[in-house]
Image (cartoon, rainbow, N blue to C red):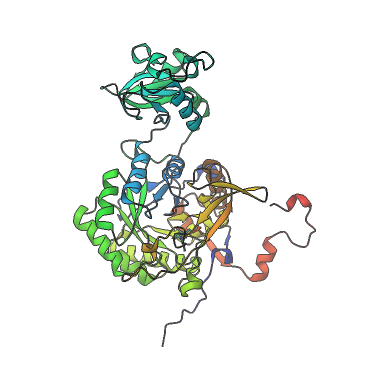
Amino acid sequence: MAYIFDEPSRTFSEYLLVPGYSSTECRVENVSLQTPVVKFKKGEESAIKMNIPLVSAIMQAVSGDELAIALAKEGGISFIYGSQSIENQAEMVRKVKAHKAGFVTSDANIRPDQTLGELLELKKRTGHSTTAVTEDGTPDGKMLGLVTSRDYRISRMSLDEKVCNFMTPFDKLIYAKKGVTLSEANNILWDNKLNALPIVDENQRLTHFVFRKDYDTHKAYPDELLDEHKRYVVGAGVNTRDYAERIPALVEAGADVLCIDSSEGFTEWQKLTLDFVREKYGDSVKIGAGNVVDKEGFEYLANAGADFIKIGIGGGSICITREQKGIGRGQASAVIEVAKARDEYYEKTGVYIPICSDGGIVYDYHMTLALAMGADFLMLGRYFSRFDEAPTDKLTINGSYVKEYWGEGSNRARNWQRYDMGGDSKLSFEEGVDSYVPYAGPLSDNVRQSLQKVKSTMCNCGVLTIPELQKNSKLTVVSATSIVEGGAHDVILRESNKNR
Ligand code: RVP
């Protein structure tokens, strides 16, 4: 007879945390959200840690290079989506690794033999009034001059006038050499009353600009996540089909950590992918695997050598896998069982394998619940897709701003490898939907606000770190009627509460 679990499969909203004793030390500013990303031995430290327990989903609508930079600034990691060509994905990774805060790659560039007309066209397209003149018109070509709106007068000049005739030539420019620090560059800007400072290498090739306007908008990023060369940390998704080509390209591009992206990962395909990494790179390349929802799945991937293990089938906001195939498990039950298996594995082997709860986070308090249930970090799709930095369009629908968000298993993404069990991939069916989500503004403000709530709840529970939360918190299942009690009830809500 089939095995039937004793307990029903539960979701986050069916649980609450019961507060514990809080000393006067339990203050938000004393809480650390640092967490391990990859496995480590007892007494040692994880080779990759995050300063906040959030990673962004391996999805077209979520994790591009812009979001990856914004999230690394806050202390988390994006996994750049793999449902694109190897070259494009590697290029996104490269862009994150090349990004230096305050140092901007020039995106308005022109050749000296081009015309004023072409310059005006470029200005309209990019919206920038500072244009670099490089030998070949590329952002890193040999720098020959600079054009700003003070260099030409449209009413007095022919549109055919060549750029070289009105640009400020390189020998009259104030510039800085590659290697200059941001604060040195800012001093040069201020001392010389400049708006833009070109940075060039030893061959006079343009590398970046530093702009005065960025100085004013510069935010402090106390949690930013950097590698040993002070570059942002970034991850990338891989699949179990083209890994032999994709993984070397991503490693070469500088990805810090990889993750096998699959809707159901208790498979030999995952082991073959992990074997490839271990044979080629030993332990130097870090790679997570998943998704699984029970002890057996965890143990299989742990023994196969995964650096972290991802949990969740069918809980994603855009996911219809449960409806289509009848597989999955409530995210809370899955996390609780896998966390127990992770702890037992640690007891037995002395190796701690971090686990990631993927999908199904709707409210900020779900983050705290998932961590309390044992997750070391969380992967979110819908949450991040609402922000400015997500690579999707912002639209208005019925007078409200929305962003587009679609599943990797939708016809739009066509990421069939994620759902692939080998064999003929022509006969695919959708496991995800195409949707809109309410636009929510910049990532930084939202992430800080959400994590402030997480920290505040941790203080209520009397804990200051994620391991303490995992060990000491008390959780209770809530009845259907006590869920009603949790919202505003038995009052007539005023109009102002309608959008709460
Ligand atoms: P959510 O944060 O609830 O939006 O869930 C995001 C997760 O959903 C992803 O990390 C992935 O595991 C899963 N996903 C992505 N696409 C699909 C699908 O099309 N079914 N599911």
Horizontally, is 250 left or right of 341 in the view? Answer: left
Q: Estimate the x, y position of residue 61 in percent, counting from the top left.
A: 47, 52
The image quarter containing residue 240 is: bottom left
Which residue is at 78% across, 52% downward?
Answer: 495
Horizontally, is 360 left or right of 263 in the view? Answer: right
The image quarter containing residue 271 is: bottom left
Q: Estimate the x, y position of residue 303 in percent, counting from the top left.
A: 28, 66
Q: Estimate the x, y position of residue 438 in percent, counting from the top left.
A: 60, 51
From what the image shows, is residue 58 above or below residue 291? above
* Nearer the observer, 18 or 181: 181
Q: Estimate the x, y position of residue 50 in percent, counting from the top left.
A: 40, 47
- In the rendered image, the residue lying farthest to the bottom is 1
Viewer can see residue 45: no
- In the rendered image, the residue lying farthest to the left is 279
Viewer can see residue 191: yes
From what the image shows, is residue 109 above or below residue 235? above
Horizontally, is 458 left or right of 480 in the view? Answer: left
Question: Where does the N terminus fall, quadrant-wise?
Answer: bottom left
* Nearer the observer, 133 or 289: 133
Which residue is at 39% across, 51% downward?
Answer: 79
